[in-house]
Image (tube, rainbow, N blue to C red):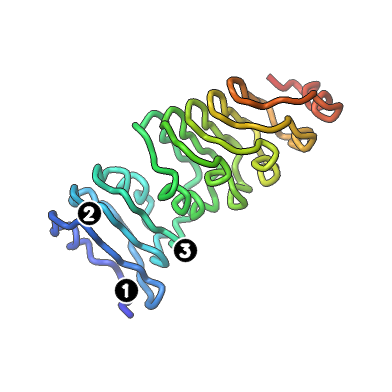
Amino acid sequence: MFAGAVPPQLGNLSALRYLDLNGCYGDLRVDDLGWLSNLPYLRYLDMSCVDMSLAANWFHSINSIPSLRVLHLQWSNPTTLEHLQLGSCGGFDIQPLQPALAALTNLQELDLLANDIDGEIYGIVGNDSKCLRKLDLKWNKLTGDIARILGSLRHLEYLTIDNNQITGHLPEMLGNLISLRYLSISSNQISGDISETVENLLGQDLE
């Protein structure tokens, strides 16, 4: 039942390997997560329900922990981030990535190219991605049906998923993405005819 600000002095515990600050039974907040970079051996971090809305540096701080393997950020409210570029960062485990991305409800641009991410693409592009305008996931190992990932991306302007393992047929719903300006889906296992609705879309200066 702890409440108040998470003390940055936790960063002095340089040998820490497990840190659970789950705030679901209290009222915890964190304004700055820079102290996480002082915990090089940390493997497990749970900050579920901690208010992170003012911690603009949260993803950079978390990504600076070389030993981190498990991350829980459910209901953590880091909602201010709009642009996130993490291309060629050396690889991500999709399981801790999912709750982190789901918390970014204002995210408009997401770049995760060339990170060797292995898993279901819907784990990255789910129902919480409605604001996305640019999505770059090329050169990973993502699987899944392309028809499933397009339903919630109605404002998408730029989509590239080249060199993954995406399957399925090019869906007619692609023609409903009226803001789409750039589409690249090569080197996957996507098949099917280009429907009339997609042909109409291709007539709108689509590259």
Q: Which circle's residue, 2 or 1, is located before the other in the chain?
A: 1
User: Tags 2 and 1 in contact by the CB under 8 Å rule?
Assistant: no
Pinpoint residue 205: horizontal percent, then vertical percent.
74, 21
Pinpoint residue 38: horizontal percent, then vertical percent.
18, 50
Element type where label 1 sits in the image: strand
- Residue under the image location 44 percent in, 56 percent down: 78
Measure the alpha-carbon separation of dots 3 and 1.
17 Å
Residue type beneath disc 1:
Gly
* Quarter of the rendering containing residue 160: top right
Q: Residues within 10 Å of mark 2 (few under 14, many from 20)?
A: some
Seen in the picture, residue 77 relative to 90 is either above or below; the reply is below
Q: Which residue is mark 1?
A: 4
**Nearest to viewer (mark 3 / mark 1):** 3
Pinpoint residue 5: horizontal percent, then vertical percent.
30, 69
Q: Which mark, by number, is residue 35? A: 2
Q: Residue furthest bottom?
A: 1
How many tags in the picture? 3
Q: Which mark, by number, is residue 94? A: none
Pinpoint residue 148: horizontal percent, then vertical percent.
67, 42
Seen in the picture, residue 151 relative to 134 is either above or below; the reply is below
* Quarter of the rendering containing residue 187: top right
Q: Which circle's residue, 3 or 1, is located before the other in the chain?
A: 1
Q: Which residue is mark 3?
A: 75
Residue type beneath disc 2:
Trp
Q: Is residue 107 left or right of residue 182?
A: left
Q: Is residue 124 left or right of residue 37?
A: right
- Residue under the image location 45 percent in, 61 percent down: 74
Q: Residues within 10 Å of mark 1 (few under 14, many from 20)?
A: few
